[in-house]
Image (cartoon, coloured by chain):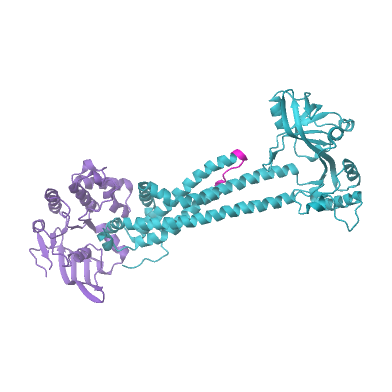
Amino acid sequence: MKIILLPMPIAPFSCFENLKISITAVLANKTRSLLTALGVVIGILAVTLMGTLISGLDQSFEKSMEFLGKDVLYIRKFQWFGEDEWWEIRNRPDILVKNAGVIRERSQYAQYVAPVSEWWTSVRKDDESVSGVRVSGTTEDYAMITVAEVEKGRFFSRAENRSGARVALIGKDISDVLFEGRNILGERIQIGNYNFRIIGEIEKQGKFLGMFSLDKQVIIPIGAHQRLFSRRGWTGINVKVDNAHIDDAHEELTALMRQLRRLRPSEKNNFAINRQDPFREQYSMIKLAIGGTGIFITILSLVVGGIGIANIMFVSVKERTKEIGTRKALGATSRMILGQFLMESMTICLFGGLVGMSLAYGGSRIINSFFPSEMPIGLAMSALGLSMLVGIISGLAPSYKAANLDPIDALRYE
Amino acid sequence: MITTKRTINVSLILLKKIYKIYHVGGEEVRALDGVDLTISKNEFLAIKGPSGSGKSTLMNMIGCLDTPTSGDYEFEGEMVHNMDDNQLASIRNRKIGFVFQTFNLLPKATAQHNVEIPLVYANIRREKRLMMASKALTSVGLEDRMHHKPNELSGGQRQRVAIARALVNNPSLVLADEPTGNLDSKSGQEIMDVFDALHQEGNTIVLVTHEDYIAAHANRTIQLF
C-alpha cells in the first residue's frame, strides 16, 4: 500500500457522518472515554477556573482601588508595602492632626486635605451591638476626597466639626444589624461608651481586597474623635490632588512633611506618603503567580491528557481493525478513515472539555460566593478550542495508522 | 490451472496475464502466476480451491482490494491495474458488493445503518440512503428487522443484512467469500437461495468456496490448485 501524504484535509462530506460514528463510539465506552479525557477535563477545569478567579480578583481589586482613589495621597506613619527594617521605623513620630492645616495652607497641589484618625470599637443600639467597627474621625473635606457617597442623610458640616458635635455617619453593615431597615436618621447609637446621633448613611462599598468590610464603619467629626478616642488609634492625612500632577504633589508633600518634621538633608523620611500604585504592583505579581500556576497546570494536564488520548486511540484502532477493513472494502478512502478517527479523538477531547467546563461552572459558582466573579466566556470558548486542538494532535498518529491499514490485512485481522 | 464449464458472452471483467508476486524472506512467492480470466455479465461464477491455492489473492484482485504485480485488469472498461488507492476505493464503492464469511457488520449499528454505509461513502443524502437501505433489506426479506442490531439477529439473518449491504449501491458485481462458512446447513441453504434469486434477477456473482455443493449453484466453476 502507498503511504498517504501528510498534509491531508478531512473530506468535508463525512464530517457529520464521522461525528455520528464518533459519538456512538464515545458513548459505547463511556467510562473509558471519561477516564481517557480526565487529563483534558483537569486542564480545561484549571484554565477556566483560573480565568474565573482572575476575573473575580480583577473586579474586586478595581472596586477596592476605587476606595483608595487614584488621585489621593495618604500621609501615614508607615509605608503600606514597606521594606524598611522595623527597628529603623518603630520610633517614628505620629502624624498629627494639626499637620493637615499646615499642608492645606502651604501646598499648591492639594485640592482637599482631611486628617483621619481611626480607632476600632463596638457600636451599640439598645441590645444589639457590632464589635470591631472602624471609627474614623475626620473633617468635612473627607466627603470631597472619598468616592463613597452619602446614601441617606448628609455629611457633617464645618460647624459641627468645629464644635465637636456628637454626630455620626454609619456604614451599611452597621445599619443592617442595628436597624434592620428601619429609619436611622436622628436615631441615637453608642460608639464605645459615648452617645452619638446618626445623621447619614454611607453607600455600600463591599470588602477591601476581600479582607475586611469597608461598610463596618462609622464616621464622626475629628473634634469629637480627638476628645473621646485620641489617646488610641492612629492618625493620617488624606490629600486629594489633581491626577495629572500626582508625582509633583508627592514630591511637594514629602518636602512639606520634612519641613514640618525639621529633618536635615542627611536624615531619612520618618513618615510615608502612600498611594494605590504599589497595590497595583503587588496585585499584578499575585495575578501573574495565579495565572502562571494555572497555565502550568493546564499545559501539564493537557500534555498528559493528550498522551492518554493518543494511547486509547491506538487501542481503538487496533480493536476496530476489522471494521476499518470492512469500511475500506465498502468504499471508504484513506482520508475518510483518517477523518473518522480524528473526529473520534476530537470528540473525546471535546467531551472532556465540556465536562471540565461544567465542573468549572460549578466551581465558579463557589468562587462567586466568596467574591463577585464571572466565568469569562471568551476564555471558556478558547478552552474548548484548545481541547479540540489536543484531540487533533493526539489523534494524528493513531488516525494515520488506521488510514494506512492495508484493507486485505485489516479484513483478515481477528 | 483453470477449468471452464460454460461461457456467456458480454464480458464484465477481463484479467490478462495477472501475476502477483510476494517476497517473503528473500524468497519469491508467486501467488498468481499469469492468470487469464473473463467474467461475463450475469454470470454466477464459483472459485474453488484449497488454502494456499491463490484463491484469496485472486478474490482480492477481482474485488479491487489489491493490484497485480503485472498484468491487465479491466472492469467494465476501467483499467484497474493502474489505479491508486482512492480510485480503487471508488470502484469498490460503486461497482462491487462484498459479502464476507464473518458478515463484518458493525455491532453497534442497526441493520438499516449497516446497509447504509456504502451509500455514506458514495456521498448520498440521508433521506435517499434510508430509502435505499430499506429497499435492499426488503429485497432480502428483512423488512421487519431493519432496526435490529446484529446481536438481535440469527446468523442467516446477519448474512442477509450483509447481502443487502452488498446490493444497496446496485453493484455490477457481487463478490462473496465463503458466505455460508459460518452458518449451519439450513441457514446456508437459505443464503444460497438468495444468491440464486439474485442471479435470476440478472446480477453477476463471484463466489469463493471450498464446498462442492455450494459451487454447484454456480453456472461456471474455476478450480485453483
Q: Please state the horizontal and vertical placement of residue A301, each as a whole percent of the image.
A: 50, 54
Q: Quadrant of the N terminus of chain B?
A: bottom left
Residue A336 vs residue A330: left or right? right
In this picture, is A32 found above or below A187?
below
In this picture, is A59 found above or below A395?
above
In this picture, is A401 found above or below A205?
below
Q: Colour of chain B?
A: purple
* Residue at image location 25% in from the left, 53% down from the top: B104
Of residue A12 and residue A291, the one placed in the foreground of this image is A291
Q: Is residue A374 magenta?
A: yes
User: Is residue B151 visible in this depiction of the protein?
Assistant: yes
Say which chain is cyan: A
Give the magenta-colored segment's residue range.
A369-377
Q: Quadrant of the C terminus of chain B?
A: bottom left
Q: Please state the horizontal and vertical placement of residue A144, each as a whole percent of the image.
A: 81, 39
Q: Please state the horizontal and vertical placement of residue A150, each as a whole percent of the image.
A: 76, 33
Residue A112 vs residue A182: left or right? right
Q: Is residue B24 magenta?
A: no
User: Is residue A151 visible in this depiction of the protein?
Assistant: no
User: In the image as oriented, which residue stretches furthest toward the front?
Assistant: A87
Q: Please state the horizontal and vertical placement of residue B55, each as a whole percent of the image.
A: 17, 65
In this picture, is A204 found above or below B56?
above
